[in-house]
Amino acid sequence: MAIDIKKLLQSVVAHGASDLHLVARSEPQIRIDGTLKAVNLPVLTGEDIEEMTYALLTEKQKKSFEEHLELDFALMLPGIGRFRANYYRTLGDIAAAFRIIPTEIPSLDDLNSPAIYKELIKREKGLILVTGPTGSGKSTTLSALLNEINLTEHKHIITIEDPVEFIHQNKKSVFSHRETGRDTRSFALALKYAMRQDPDIILIGEMRDKETIEAALTAAETGHLVFGTLHTNSAPGTINRIIDVFGGDEQAQIRTMISTSLVAVISQVLLPKVGGGRVAVPEIMVTNHAIANLIREDKIHQIYSQMQLGQGSTGMQTQTQVLLKLLNKRVIEKQHALQYSNKPDELKKNINFR
């Protein structure tokens, strides 16, 4: 007999988990503080999971899943919470992953975010990228940035997502939340028509392809503040990823566009904290004259050394510096710092030096 999926999701929320996984031949698994743990329930069959998961779908969603074998959607269960769901198949059986989306949108202060974030969102135009692997808290950071604008500025904010995650209540700003597949056909198409919707700020849930990236750069150049995400783990890596999407004959022009429109790259990971919970470790690059020149001149590899200079005035910080601060305060453990570090050799050298 299949488990009541709504009661299971309610239990997941109550346990403070971030995700729920339903895969045949395994008991349900939840992720707490980044670690998967089995729930004390029977091992599921494919038929169990199909019965559980289909109970949450509309007929249109069922048809789409059966046709494409993949389905992304957002789910609101009154009295329980909001979820981002993905259905897929494994060895012929249906499987599902649910990500819990907090209904209370955190503030930058709630997240103990660096002070530079409140400066970045005051920009009238440009591109701000929040990057990192899946599950690194990108969506939470972006929602907090937009929440701060909502509390302080009178702006029209368009979000383009697949699916829509955090839903903002209009305070000082006005939000137009658009979901691909339901409210628009694609990110690129939504961006094209966003220019006619009088936006001040645009959030792009994921910059997946050349067309979307090009439209985002153009929007940032033409007087809009654009927020976007990429699955990259550093500022130089992010810039290279964007450039590499384009052909060799286009790259010089794209480097020029990036050098004039890129405001900042925030690359973050979440690390387990001593005593439980997780802490965000953000590496921050803020484009200045020197970095803009390096981008134009195709010297991306030199950006990291610029990020280490004059940090008191720029607000920039490297991941290694943040990890060392957290180690000094005993917020994280050495093994986790080295495990998640982009530059473990540099980190190890600094730890040994201390």
Image (spheres, helix red, strand yellow):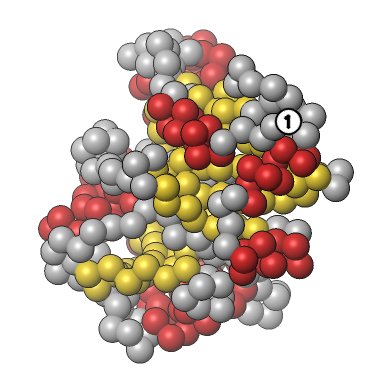
For image coordinates 35% across by 89% down, the residue present is: 196
| Relative image position of residue 23 (x, y in whole percent) | 72, 36
| Relative image position of residue 114 (x, y in whole percent) | 28, 39
- Observer-nearest of 87 and 109: 87
For image coordinates 57% across by 62% down, the residue present is: 58
Up the image or down, 105 lies above or below 280; here it is below
Up the image or down, 89 lies above or below 227; here it is above
- Observer-nearest of 307 and 63: 63
| Relative image position of residue 313 (x, y in whole percent) | 23, 45
* Horizontal side of residue 90 vs 20, given as left or right: right
Neighbourhood count class around disc 1 (C-alpha, 10 Å): few under 14, some 14–19, many 20 upward = some
* Horizontal side of residue 190 vs 246, given as left or right: left
Kind of residue at disc 1: Leu
Displayed quadrant of residue 202:
bottom left
Q: Is residue 345 visible?
A: no
Q: Which residue is mark 1?
A: 44
For image coordinates 34% across by 42% down, the residue present is: 79
Up the image or down, 160 lies above or below 73; here it is below
Q: Quadrant of the N terminus?
A: top right
